[in-house]
Amino acid sequence: MLAKRVISAFVLGPLILGFVYLGGLWYWALLTVVAIGAGYEYLCLVSQAGERADYPLTALFILLIMVGARYPSWAVIRGGMTLLLAFSLLWQMARRGGDIPVVGWALSLGGAFYLGFLLSHFVSLRALPRGLEWTLLAFFPAWANDTGAYFVGRWIGEHPFAPRISPKKTWEGSIGGWISGIAVGTLMGAVLGLPLLHAFLLGLLISLAATGGDLVESMFKRWAGVKDSGRLIPGHGGVLDRIDSLLFSVAAVYYYLIWVIRV
């Protein structure tokens, strides 16, 4: 298991960083594919939990959100989302047989915003001045948090952190992850020319956000009664398993940069 995890990381890491470096349309296209794939895994979890889901609705909303992130001045995107929202509600009323699937509609739409909206921040962050550097700053501390939590948890983890949601997550592992993420974030922020306080706070924010993102996905998996969201990536599970911690981290970095540092 560990060997597969390491090999997958060595293969996928450079590939992802290559697309981050390229930016532009290639980066956006990869993120859109990832978002739609993660949306499919999310709806599989919904289905395994016993609820009906509407994948076309989720995929279309994710696509519109991602196109809106790429072309924020396109007013037609907002109109398209409004029409899709209205027609999806009318479709629920028109469907025959059984109960009106309001819960499935809500879960489908919620998944689109959970994944599409949060992943759209990857595009927005990369589009900022020095966007490549800020994106790497969001990625590496989150990865360091995941790695530190995994190894410290396996080594000395004893005390459950969130047993109702993620039984294997421990306080020892979480603290090890936070220390790793803060250290990497502080170092990278200082190298990028940020004041030490901002670098430290970003490292802390990314680490906490990464843990939160991981727990949110664990909540969905616990609800569905499964260990992984998929089997696409050996040693890591599905696409959603690989990006869960980044979803909150990238958004946190983006808003810290535009609200606090004002880049």
Image (spheres, rainbow, N blue to C red):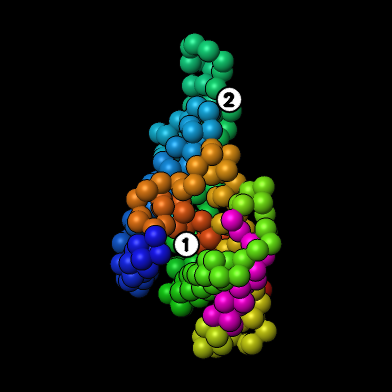
The residue positioned 54% from the left and 39% from the top of the image is 225
Q: Residue 221 at x, y = what percent? A: 54, 44
| Circle 1: element type | helix
Q: Quadrant of residue 156?
A: bottom right
Q: Residue 258 at x, y = what percent? A: 60, 70
Instruction: Looking at this view, name the residue that lies furthest to the top.
Output: 97
Label 1, residues with CA under 10 Å away: few <14, some 14-19, many ≥20: many
Q: What residue is shown with label 1?
A: 122
For the magenta stretch, what is the residue range? 168-186
The residue positioned 48% from the left and 16% from the top of the image is 95
Magenta run includes residue 177 = yes
Direction from residue 45 to residue 181 in the image, left or right:
right
Q: Nearer the viewer, residue 261 or 136?
A: 136
Q: Residue 76 at x, y = what percent? A: 44, 44
Against 47, residue 176 (above or below) is below
Magenta run includes residue 92 = no
Q: Main secondary structure of the magenta part?
A: helix
Mark 1 and mark 2 lie on one chain; the one further toward the N terminus is 2
Q: Amino acid at mark 1?
A: Phe
The residue positioned 57% from the left and 50% from the top of the image is 218
Q: Nearer the viewer, residue 56 or 153?
A: 153
Which label number is shown at residue 180?
A: none
Q: What residue is shown with label 2?
A: 102
